[in-house]
Amino acid sequence: MYKFVLLAALIAPAAFAAESQVVEKPLVAQSLESFNLESAKIREQMQPGGLYEHIRSSDKSKVEARMDSMQKILQAHATQADMPQSDKLALFNAQEEVNGILRHNDNNRLVCESRAPVGSHIPVKTCRTYGEIEESRQASVKQLNEMNNLSRTQKSGN
């Protein structure tokens, strides 16, 4: 019995990870044309229902600012070969920052933790996606707010 549970716990995260992949480099600024397509797709994915829908507003602002600066650099030069080294470096750094933020906020990013359940000293590894964790957190906050509002309503009614 225990062997089956342990085997299932080890296989399930691997099967789940193969099913949904995190995009390693969501943005690769090679030309203005490809950049415009990729940045439009990223902006769409940061909207509700998108791959990066749970991105914090501060991170979203950083992504927007970096993509704007990248677009200005790419508009100023026909190709990367025409760019001075300082612009190439600025473009690369902005691209890496955007990719890091997006990878961290990817709904498919698998987050695993090892925790001993109540009443046991044997840790159990559980894995969920970032999207599942954020949806659960938002549902908990919403439920807590509803209970607080109900409590206030009942106190003011007495």
Image: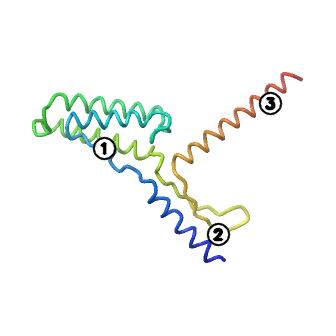
Depth order, front residue of 105/48: 48
Spatial CA distance of label 1 from label 3 is 47 Å
Mark 1 or mark 2: which comes first in sequence? 1
Q: Nearer the viewer, residue 82 or 122?
A: 82
Residue beneath disc 2: 122
Label 1 with label 3: CB-CB less than 8 Å? no
Q: Are marks 3 and 2 in contact (CB under 8 Å)?
A: no
Residue 2, given in percent of the width and then of the height, sits at 65, 76
Q: Which residue is mark 1?
A: 96
- Identify the amino acid type marked 1: Glu
Which residue is painted at 24% across and 40% down in the image?
A: 29
Secondary element at image label 3: helix
Query: In the rendered view, would you say 68 is above or below 29?
Result: above
Mark 2 is on which residue type? Ile
User: Disc 1 to disc 2, how far (Cα)?
Assistant: 39 Å
The answer to which image quadrant residue 146 occupies is top right
